[in-house]
Image: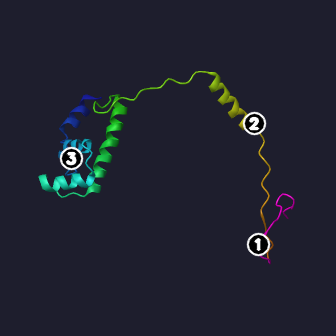
Amino acid sequence: MDLHINKLLEEIPEKPPRSKLEPHTDVIGALRRKRLTYREIAQFFQDHLAITVAPSTIHDFVRVRRRRGKRNEVSTGEQSSTRPSRVSVPPLKNTPVNDDVQQRIAALKQRTPAEAPQPVFSYEEDEPLKLRRNPASTKVD
């Protein structure tokens, strides 16, 4: 990046956090790891920190931070140390079972569609709906 632009960016002061929960991110994370509900966390904040907050506000706060964290992990290529890394499963190789499945899928794609089912009821405009005794033997007009 251009040095002039870097200098301008450094001169811009950071804005204060928009959420009153922002300074307590670690506390919320610790309480969630202890399996406390959002309602219990809201009560904890009321009792110990004198902060009145709705459980839904805490939920939204956690959800937004979780989404941001995943996006940052993907963009930076880093993984969170608190979450276990996912095990990658190698793709299946051509095994007899896999080949059999592929052949069955191909056969399903090539088959012709079945005949349209005949209606069970017959409809005539000025008469009540009638149940057909043998729907396959009658023809629809």
**Magenta-colored segment: predominant secondary structure:** loop
What whole-number distance in Å separates the C-alpha atoms at marks 2 and 3? 58 Å
Q: Is residue 20 visible?
A: yes
Q: Are marks 1 and 3 in contact (CB under 8 Å)?
A: no
Quarter of the image for the C terminus: give it.
bottom right
Q: Which mark is residue 129?
A: 1
Instruction: Name, please, the residue furthest toward the front.
Output: 133
The three-letter code of the residue at mark 3 reads Glu
Element class at badge 2: helix
Magenta span: 126-141
Where's residue 78, x and y in %? 32, 28
Residue wearing tag 3: 22
Q: Would you call the spot at circle 2 few (<14 residues within 10 Å), some (14-19), or many (20 or more)?
A: few
What whole-number distance in Å separates the C-alpha atoms at marks 1 and 2? 38 Å
Q: Is residue 15 visible?
A: no
Residue wearing tag 2: 110
Up/down of 110 relative to 56, above or below = above
Up/down of 118 relative to 16, above or below = below
Q: Residue at x 30, y 32 (%)?
A: 80
